[in-house]
Image (cartoon, helix red, strand yellow):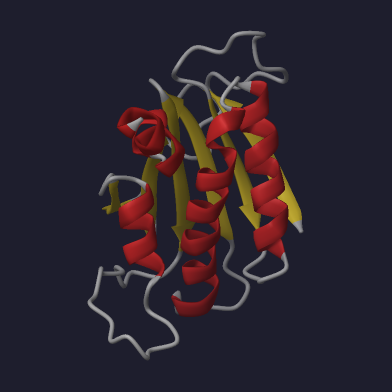
Amino acid sequence: MIDTSLRTASPALGTAAAATLDPPASPPDWVAVSWSWQRSPRCVPRARRHLRRELEAWGLAELADVAELVLCELFTNAVRHARGPRDRRIATRYQRVPGGVRVEVHDACATWPALKQTEGNEESGRGLALVDALTGARWGVSERDGIGKLVWAVVAAETTPESKEEKEQ
């Protein structure tokens, strides 16, 4: 279930100093939205819907399919692999950046994910490789305030498969 929503001009998750109730009609590049979720697979589609809604409000609807897939991979990794108390929450943060969106997933696990090579017959382990391909290697892991980490990825028009196809034509 969704716990909280915060629109903020601050780069820090949960900083309320510049919070507003409604985004401006044409938001500047620093606009960000944060949500807190239960650590449950049921929250993944809800988070995708919220991301799509924000992208549409920011005039970035063309990035929605790729951004949702990236979010799905990062959020699912946090649900499946983040070790910690079951009551620990997962936070998402979507920040408008020049030409795209930065998608962040915060969890309470200190273990950082790593891109790995998989064999052709393995059933899992391809999520970060997919994120890497979809974002043009614009993703990473960072420390955060408190326990845990944040995994982020930038989805921009120049890194989506659709934009690459247009350039090739």
Residue 32 x %, y %: 53, 29
Q: Report how many numbered discs are placed on residues in the image.
A: 0
Front in this rendered view, residue 100 or 46: 100
Point out the residue furthest to the right here.
1
Point 58% across, 39% down: residue: 64
Horizontally, residue 60 falls left or right of residue 96, namely right
Vertical placement of residue 147 versus 77, above or below: above
Horizontally, residue 136 falls left or right of residue 33, namely left
Vertical placement of residue 86 versus 99, above or below: below
Front in this rendered view, residue 139 or 22: 139
Point 49% across, 68% down: residue: 78
- Quadrant housing the C terminus: top left
> Can see residue 84?
no
- Quadrant housing the N terminus: bottom right
Residue 168 x %, y %: 31, 33
Point out the residue furthest to the bottom here.
121
Front in this rendered view, residue 4 or 45: 45
Residue 87 x %, y %: 63, 72
Horizontally, residue 146 falls left or right of residue 3, namely left
* Image quadrant assignment for residue 51: top right
Horizontally, residue 1 falls left or right of residue 5, namely right
